[in-house]
Image: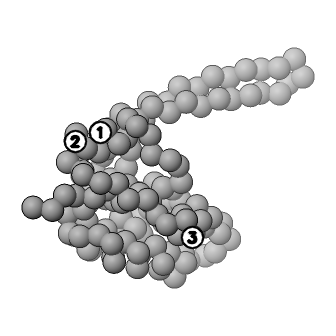
C-alpha cells in the first residue's frame, strides 16, 4: 500500500505539531507544499475578482496531477477558495481537512488610545470538511 500524502493549500508554514498530528491522526507519510508560484496564487487571490474559479485553475491542475485518491488536502485561506477547493477535493476522491486551533489573545492599550492586539495560535486537531 502506498503512503498517503497531505497536500498543503494554506498561507503559512506547517508547524511541527501539525506535522506530528498529520502522521499520527491521518496516517500521512509525506507532506507536500504548493510550489512557490502556486503558493503566490493561493495567497494573493484578488479581493475585487467577482469569480475565482478560473484564477484557481493552476492550483486545481497541480493537485489533480500530484495526488491520488485517499490523499489528504489541508485547505485554509480565502473562504470562497476553500469552498471551491474542498468541493474539487471531494470530486477527486481526496479528503479535505482544516486545522483547528486554540487561540490566545492579548490586548494592550496605550495612553494615546492605540490598541495593540497579539494573537497566538496552537494546533489542536485536523477536522474533515463536510462532517
| Left or right: where 61 falls relative to 3 | right
Cα–Cα gap, marks 3 and 1: 27 Å
Tell me which corner region of the image, top left, top right, bottom left or bottom right, holds residue 71.
bottom left
Q: Residue at x 42, y 64 (%)?
A: 83
Give yes or no for contact between labels 2 and 3 (Cβ–Cβ under 8 Å): no
Out of 18 and 129, give the one closest to the viewer: 18
Sequence-wise first label, 3 or 1: 1
Q: Is the N terminus in the top left, top right, bottom left or bottom right quadrant?
A: bottom left
Sort mark 2 into few (<14), some (14-19) or many (20+) by Cα contacts within 10 Å: few
Q: Which residue is mark 3?
A: 37
Q: Which residue is mark 2?
A: 25
Helix, strand, or loop for circle 3?
helix
Q: Residue at x 25, y 44 (%)?
A: 23
Instruction: Residue 21: give its label.
Output: 1
- Answer whether residue 90 is visible to the viewer in this image: no
Sequence-wise first label, 2 or 3: 2
Cα–Cα gap, marks 2 and 1: 6 Å
Q: Position of residue 37 (x, y in %)?
A: 57, 70
Amino acid at each position: 500500500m502506498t503512503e498517503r500524502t497531505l497536500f498543503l493549500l494554506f498561507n503559512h508554514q506547517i508547524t511541527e505539531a501539525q506535522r506530528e498530528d498529520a502522521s499520527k491522526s491521518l496516517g500521512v507519510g509525506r507532506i507536500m507544499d504548493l510550489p512557490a508560484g502556486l503558493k503566490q496564487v493561493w495567497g494573493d487571490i484578488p479581493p475585487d475578482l467577482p469569480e475565482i474559479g478560473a484564477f484557481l485553475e493552476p492550483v486545481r491542475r497541480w493537485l489533480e496531477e500530484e495526488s491520488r485518491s485517499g490523499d489528504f488536502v489541508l485547505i485554509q485561506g480565502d473562504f470562497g477558495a476553500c469552498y471551491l477547493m474542498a468541493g474539487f477535493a471531494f470530486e477527486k476522491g481526496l479528503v479535505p481537512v482544516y486545522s483547528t486551533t486554540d487561540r490566545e489573545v492579548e490586548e494592550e492599550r496605550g495612553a494615546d488610545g492605540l490598541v495593540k492586539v497579539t494573537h497566538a495560535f496552537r494546533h489542536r486537531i485536523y477536522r474533515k470538511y463536510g462532517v
